[in-house]
Image (spheres, rainbow, N blue to C red):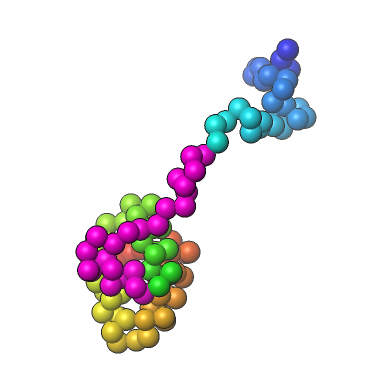
Amino acid sequence: MSAMLGQLRWPATRQATPGTPKLNDSHFPAAPEGALDRSPRPKTSFESEFLALGEGARLWLVEAAAAGTGEMQVKMAAAIELAKLFSPGDVGWALEDAAVHGRFARS
């Protein structure tokens, strides 16, 4: 059975009220376990040094990669250099703030 909505025909089981579709979670497969809970694993000492800046560095790396950010190693090196001049905790906080607000530009 379907309901008529303008020229579109919607299955009645997916319509809560006219014009308001209702999604049924049973129609979609469950997310694979662990797929959304991955964390970066350092492969080099450079990556280990960057991730040692804390949770902010990990979050920045994940978000920057998801956004398709270019020249990530240059930006990571800059963060490591800043951590030598300032508190690593402050640099980690700045990286976390940048990740949350999607700030991945070079300048």
Q: Residue 15 in the image: state x and y as whole percent.
A: 72, 26
Q: Residue shown at 24%/60% (left/top)?
A: 43
Work out whether residue 44 or residue 28 is closer to the camera in this orientation and state it: 44
Q: Is residue 41 magenta?
A: yes
Magenta highlight range: 31-53
In the displayed structure, 67 sits above or below 88; it is above
- Report if residue 69 is visible in the image: yes
Q: Residue 96 in the image: state x and y as whole percent.
A: 44, 69
Q: Residue 36 in the image: state x and y as whole percent.
A: 47, 48
Q: Residue furthest top?
A: 1
Q: Is residue 66 left or right of residue 3?
A: left
Q: Quadrant of residue 104?
A: bottom left
In the displayed structure, 11 sits above or below 41; it is above
Question: Taken as a whole, is the magenta stretch helix, strand or loop?
Answer: loop
Q: Quadrant of residue 20?
A: top right
Q: Residue 2 in the image: state x and y as whole percent.
A: 71, 15
- Report if residue 103 is visible in the image: no
Q: Quadrant of the C terminus?
A: bottom left
Q: How many numbered marks are there? A: 0
Q: Is residue 35 left or right of residue 79?
A: right
In the displayed structure, 77 sits above or below 69; it is below
Q: Residue shown at 64%/33% (left/top)?
A: 25
Q: Residue furthest right?
A: 17
Q: Residue shown at 32%/59% (left/top)?
A: 41
Q: Quadrant of residue 99?
A: bottom left
Q: Quadrant of the N terminus?
A: top right
Q: Residue shown at 35%/58% (left/top)?
A: 40
Q: Is residue 6 magenta?
A: no
